[in-house]
Image (spheres, rainbow, N blue to C red):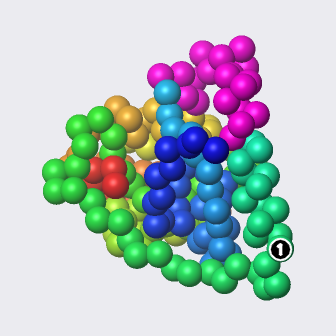
Amino acid sequence: MGFDLKFQDDGYGPSDHSSFYAKDIAVLFFFTGVHSDYHRPTDVYQKIDTTSEEKLLKYVYRVINEVDTFDTRPLFTKTQEPTRPEGGSEFRVYLGTIPDYGEEVEGVKLSGVREGSPAASAGLKGGDVIVECAGKKIKNIYDYTYALQEHKVGEEIDLVVLRNRDRITLKATLEGRP
């Protein structure tokens, strides 16, 4: 259909599908990329390119219909962890947390963390709720994302989490975004 497709052999990503992948459920994720208004108050519906959106949705529909014709459910396959470049990126940091979008809480509830990630090394676990990141109160995913964006690769930050009913402070060293 004229799309320039790029495939990424990684079940995690910046959306709800990560929670399924973390539970060993096969996922397929379509993402059109970020733009300067992505996840910001200026990202308003008037900026949607409806012609391109319609073309994309028709493509996704075709893929879903094809998968629906399979005799068996697609099998889960654990992907190989992507390699991160040495030195990382000066614009984006990586922690390796997997938000749980299925439950609304004050803070960011985690469904898990990526193996070998800074989050795993820091001791973060599925079920933890991040309530502070580097001294900033975290009420939602946006607070968390913006707090992380203020830091650079190699910095050590404090994370305050609620685990069960305990308030725990953990230290994490940020890496470059994969």
In the depicted structure, whether residue 26 falls above or below residue 165? below
| Residue under numbered circle 1 | 69
Q: Residue furthest left?
A: 87
- Is residue 63 or residue 21 the one in the foreground? 63
Mark 1 lies on a secondary structure that is loop
Give the number of callouts.
1
Say whether residue 62 is visible: yes
Q: Residue at x 82, y 62 (%)?
A: 65
Percent position of residue 66, x then y: 77, 66
Q: Residue at x 40, y 75 (%)?
A: 80
Using the rendered view, name the quadrant where residue 162 is placed: bottom right
Percent position of residue 86, x then y: 16, 56
- Is residue 41 or residue 107 the one in the foreground? 41
Q: Residue at x 64, y 62 (%)?
A: 28
- Is residue 142 or residue 76 the one in the foreground? 76
Q: Residue at x 33, y 40 (%)?
A: 92
Residue 44 in the magenta stretch? The answer is yes
User: Magenta stretch?
Assistant: 36-56
In the depicted structure, whether residue 13 falls above or below residue 111? above
Using the rendered view, name the quadrant where residue 133 is placed: top left
**Is 68 left, or right, of 60 in this rendering?**
right
In the depicted structure, whether residue 24 falls above or below residue 103? below
Residue type, label 1: Thr
Using the rendered view, name the quadrant where residue 115 is placed: bottom left
Q: Quadrant of the C terminus?
A: bottom left
Percent position of residue 140, x then y: 62, 39
Percent position of residue 147, x then y: 43, 35
Q: Quadrant of the N terminus?
A: top right
Say whether residue 110 is visible: no
Q: Residue furthest front?
A: 1
- Is residue 26 or residue 160 the one in the foreground? 26
Residue 96 in the magenta stretch? The answer is no
